[in-house]
Image: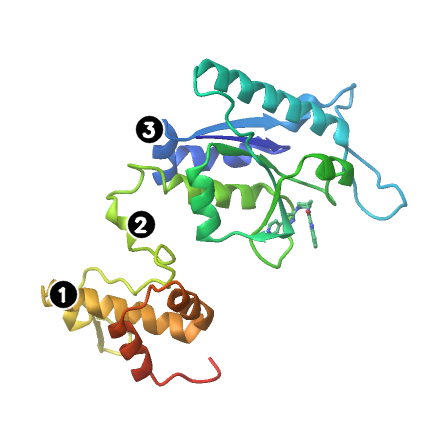
Amino acid sequence: MRFDVITLFPELFAPHLEVGVTRRAYAGGSLQLKLWPLRDFAEGNYRRVDDRPFGGGPGMVMMAPPLERALSAVRGARAQEAGEGEGEGAAPRAPLIHFSPTGRKLDQALVRELAAGSGAVLLCGRYEGIDQRFLDRHVDLEVSLGDFVLSGGELPALALLDAVARLQPGVLQDAASHQQDSFEDGLLDCPHYSRPEQLPRADGGVDAVPDVLLSGHHGRIARWRRERSLEITARRRADLIEAARAAGRLSKEDERFLRSLKLDATP
Ligand code: 9WO
């Protein structure tokens, strides 16, 4: 799967390509990332990509013409690559994704949708934003990380790439690892513990690992983890319990456990 990123700051993507599990997705070839530095598509001695907003006001706006040229180059390169892959007819055009707080909130369902597709073109805005005419013409999907403002779309693009990269086959240490994750089953994650078994505290006491995790009883451990997931989700994200229930993802045993919890009205 291939992602193309149109950005003024391609160097921000280097760590994602060079470090940790995401590097494996690219090294293994399941994921391809092509960066398109917007400055390369600017014209004139000053290589301008931004200009003052019509109507006045502070800041600068990303101009449409360099973006049009960059997107044409991306579309051309993607078409060429698809043609080299022979047969199979016309693949659906990769969606152009723009990152904005006004977009659809990124969640694991959207990540899975994108991981199952043939990639996307990611458009990273800077300054006060992008000329609306370019957005109206080309953007297929706006994606938001939440209700806050950043200085550019690069970090949201990296978040999306990171989430998609770790779903590529062979990227995680073992395949079961993301099956257990928070959100893969629509619940928050259970707590995790490692050595030492006894962690000394400043007050002279110790914090111990829950006994059940040392018991070697896999059935009881799985049940304990399930209950911790259900409990933290019920306390922090009652909406996710409701969604899991509606999707038929809660067993009778889960429901019995949830009824046993003393849930506070205010968290
Ligand atoms: C900024 C903004 C603020 C309030 C309401 C809507 C908004 N849209 C944008 C916007 O598209 N800004 C562009 C991208 C240009 C300036 C930097 N950009 C940006 C994206 N800032 N913050 C984001 C963002 C994207 C996804 N999730 C959270 C924040």
Residue 20 found in image quarter:
top left
Decide if residue 1 is on the left or right side of residue 196. Answer: right
- The mark tally for this picture is 3
Identify residue for label 1: 219
Q: Disc 3 designates what residue? A: 28
Query: What residue is rendered at 32% in x and 78% in y?
Result: 258
Give whichever of discs 1 and 3 has the lower sequence position. Answer: 3
Q: CA distance from mark 1 to mark 2?
A: 20 Å
Position above or below: 11 against 198: above
Q: Judging from the image, what secondary structure is the residue with disc 3 in?
A: loop
Is label 3's Cβ within 8 Å of ligand 1? Answer: no
Q: Quadrant of residue 64?
A: top right
| Amino acid type of the residue tagged 3 in the rendering | Gly
**Side of 80 relative to 151 (left or right):** left
How far across and how far down the image is residue 50, in percent? 77, 34
**Amino acid type of disc 1?**
Gly
Structural crowding at the residue carrying mark 3, measured as other residues with C-alpha within 10 Å and reported as few (<14), some (14–19) or many (≥20)? few
Question: Residue 178's mark?
Answer: 2
Mark 2: C-beta under 8 Å from nearest atom of ligand 1: no
